[in-house]
Structure formats: C-alpha cells, structure tokens
Image (cartoon, rainbow, N blue to C red):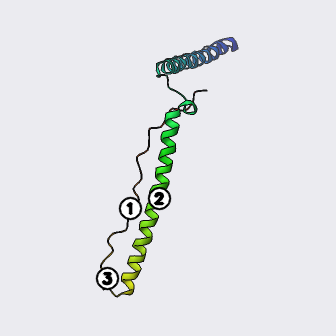
C-alpha cells in the first residue's frame, strides 16, 4: 500500500472520530438547552424577600436554641457535680440535655447568571 492509501485511511479514521465528537457535543448542547428551558422561573435569592426573612428567623431561632441548651447544660453539670460530691445522696439529674434545632426553611434557587 502506498502513502496516499495510508493517508486516506488515517483521514477517514480521524474524520470518523471528529464526527462522533460533533454528534455527542450537539446532543449534549440540545439536552442542556431543553432542560434550561423547562426549568420553572424562580426569583433569585437576593430578590426573594420572604426567603431572606425566613433564613434570618431561622438563624435567630438557632442562636436561641443554643443559648437554651447552654443554660440547661450548665444546670445539669452543676447537678451532676453536686451529686458526685454528696456520695449519691442527691437524686440522679437524668440524661444530658439535647440540642433541639428548629427545622430549616427550604433552600432558594441561586440567582442565574
């Protein structure tokens, strides 16, 4: 086989690879475009006043829950220490308090660029 025959085979091979890449990229682009058009229109987070208020309230509720937990833990630790020093004469203070956090509000969609 001469060099022109080999060159034709290599050219056909590279052309096939290039066409495959073009087809894959074309399909991917069409899929991304279709999914972007089917997404519901939402208000960006910066413009969603209700979402910002919900997250501000959540942050305040978390801070309050932590403060209540620290107060309960302080009382519980003192009760445990007093019981240990009394050689078991004082009642058992019970289990360690739990930190109960409020439920998080739904996450808003990030703003589209």
Residue furthest out toward the right: 3
**Count of labels shown?**
3
Q: Residue at x 47, y 37 (%)?
A: 107
Residue 36: horizontal and vertical position, in percent?
A: 51, 21
Q: Residue at x 44, y 38 (%)?
A: 106
The residue carrying pointer 1 sits among few (fewer than 14), some (14 to 19) or many (20 or more) residues within 10 Å by Cα, namely few
Residue 93, compared with residue 23, is above or below; it is below
The residue pinned by badge 3 equals 90
The residue pinned by badge 1 equals 98
Please, what secondary structure does the residue beneath circle 1 have? Answer: loop
Q: Which mark is residue 66?
A: 2
**Quarter the N terminus occupies:** top right
**Quarter the C terminus occupies:** top right
Task: Indicate which label's residue lies in the foreground, 1 or 2.
Answer: 2
Q: Which mark is residue 29?
A: none
- Marks 2/3: CA distance? 28 Å
């Amino acid at each position: 086989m001469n060099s022109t025959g080999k060159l034709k085979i290599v050219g056909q091979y590279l052309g096939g690879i290039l066409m495959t890449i073009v087809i894959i990229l074309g399909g991917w682009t069409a899929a991304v475009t279709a999914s972007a058009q089917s997404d519901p229109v939402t208000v960006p987070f910066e413009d969603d006043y209700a979402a910002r208020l919900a997250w501000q309230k959540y942050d305040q509720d978390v801070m309050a829950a932590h403060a209540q937990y620290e107060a309960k833990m302080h009382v519980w630790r003192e009760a445990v220490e007093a019981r240990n020093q009394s050689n078991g004469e004082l009642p058992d203070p019970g289990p360690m308090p739990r930190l109960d956090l409020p439920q998080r509000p739904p996450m808003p969609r990030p703003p589209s660029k």
